[in-house]
Amino acid sequence: MLDTLDAAAVRRWCASGLAALQRHQGEIDDLNVYPVPDGDTGTNLVLTLTSAQQALAMDLETLPEDGHTPHGHALRLMARGALLGARGNSGVILSQILRGFAEALAPAPAVRGRQFAAALGLATTAAYAAVAQPVEGTLLSVVAAAARAAEQADSDDLRAVTRAAAAGAAGALARTPEQLPALARAGVVDAGGRGLCVLLDALVEVVTGESPRPPAPTSPAVRPPATAVRETGSSAYAYEVQYLLDATDEAVVRLRAELGALGDSLVIVGDAGPAIGTWNVHVHVNDVGAAIEAGVVAGRPHRITVTRFADQAASPPTPLADGRAAVVVATGAGIAELFRAEGATVVPANPSTGELLDTIRATGAARVVVLPNDPNTQSVASTAAREAHRLGVKVSVVPTRSPVQALAALAVRDPSRRFEDDVIAMAEAAGACRYAEVCHAGKEALTVAGPCRPGDVLALVEGEVHLIGAELLDTCTAVVDRMLGGGGELVTLLCGADAPDGLADRVREHVERSWPFVEVQAYEGGQPHYPLLVGVE
């Protein structure tokens, strides 16, 4: 049992919290509002906390003279790692909760009950500030309830306060279906809130030594490895070296000069200050050993990765004129090729903040527009944009929610315009493109269009279920008719990886018969889960 939260306890909390999230990963992924088998909140939380643990995987005994306590230093590393590895809205919000903890507790000589309660309050404020339009019935409600319960405990007993916080979070989680009708219709609680409850339960276990009832085992989802490609820089260098580095600002100044002499595409991102900071180091070199050794001399390198460009199959992104670039998040090989043909740099689906930031800086452009193409990636894109601004790169996020909106935005891009005017034109084009997704229901649920069963065909317009059908083609044509009923001159069809042969041709034929003055463009998108994506402009 613990009376205070020290550095060792922070490390144990991170490790046990990650293990608990991995056990519950499948369960949290399955907490989908709509019965579509693409839930990834559990996966996003696992990947975010994995990054936090990797940032903590070092000796914390030798600390800088930066005025922070050992537990504060550990929390700062955990928060920074979570930020760079944040995936999805849930991951971004979690990283801000950890940042609030770090800011509140770093200067505290000891972390007892009242200090913990105050930190949870600051963490809640940081979480709400990270969301442009906070919605109750989500992870935000759960962390706010945990903070209120911790404050109402009004005790210096850390065990009592952490138990109260976990209980408050659990109660708020149970109430989320009352706050969000979509959760009530689907018969689920909020996935992000469930993840936070798992983390708070893990903290209670660390503080009290009381083990919770063992959960039913689940198989963690496997994320395919991302394909690395050559970024900017000369082809004379054969390797990309990246690592996180704990070092002082002065040591990093020397490291920049040394790595600059070894290769090119050098970028070092981190927190400048009078003492130690966590830095992300990236460089293209031929002498891998020298690049890593330079990091050892400068400080404490970890999460070291080395990529040999000759082993990669993907081609480099097409550079854009006028110091500008477009970065697009894409799922599906065909969709990715469409974006590359428009001169955009493509990032695989569900990127972390660090991965998106790396891609932004790899363009070498001073002004970058980011198209996230997924509501769950918009928070990640916004966080990466803020980080990029710290490096002197101007980034604007066009809030596209579907690949068809990104295609509409890229079609009007004009480098001859002022960057700000070009971004506005792209945003207007994306907003004028209505989008729909057709998929098969993965489970029984109650939607706004009525009840559905596994295997039913669902047509979602702007993210809401509008049609439930028995036949794929009939549902596809019906949703196109419904969208064109509101007007439109151009229909874009993106066929998914599991679409039957000839689906796009038959939908095109239907439009040509029923809507003779409407143009149709059809492409092989290759996206999973959705046999057809539809855009109407």
Image (spheres, helix red, strand yellow):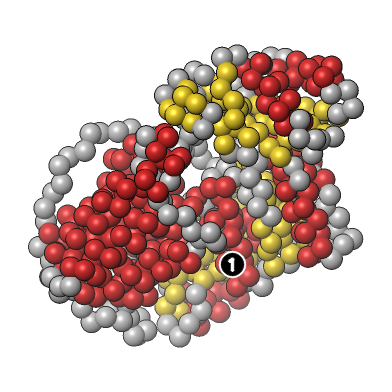
373 vs 313, nearest the viewer: 373
User: Image check: 499 left or right of 449?
Assistant: right
Q: Amino acid at mark 1?
A: Arg
Q: Is residue 108 above or below residue 30?
A: below
x, y (%) of residue 331?
Answer: 61, 37
64 up-or-down from 524: above or below = below
Residue 270 drawn at (x, y percent)? 51, 71
Disc 1 is placed on an element classified as helix
Residue 223, can we see it? yes
Q: Give me the residue at 42% from left, 24% from top.
A: 444
Q: Is residue 57 visible?
A: no
Residue 371 picture location, percent across and down: 67, 51
Question: Which residue shows up at 71% across the image and 40% down it?
Answer: 434
Asked which quadrant contains residue 395, the reply is: bottom right
Q: Nearer the viewer, residue 177 or 406?
A: 177
Which residue is labeled 1 in the image?
Answer: 386
Residue 110 placement: quadrant: bottom left
Q: Nearer the viewer, residue 327 or 505?
A: 505
Residue in the picture at 54% in, 74% down? 255
Question: In the rendered picture of this protein, how many numbered marks are placed on residues?
Answer: 1
Would residue 201 be found to the left or right of residue 340 on screen? left
Q: Quadrant of the C terminus?
A: top right
Give the camera-side residue of 208 and 59. 208
Label 1 crowd bin: few (<14), some (14–19), many (20+), radius 10 Å: some
Viewed as shown, does residue 263 lie left or right of 55? right
Q: Position of residue 163 (x, y in %)?
A: 17, 59
Which quadrant does the N terminus fall into? bottom left
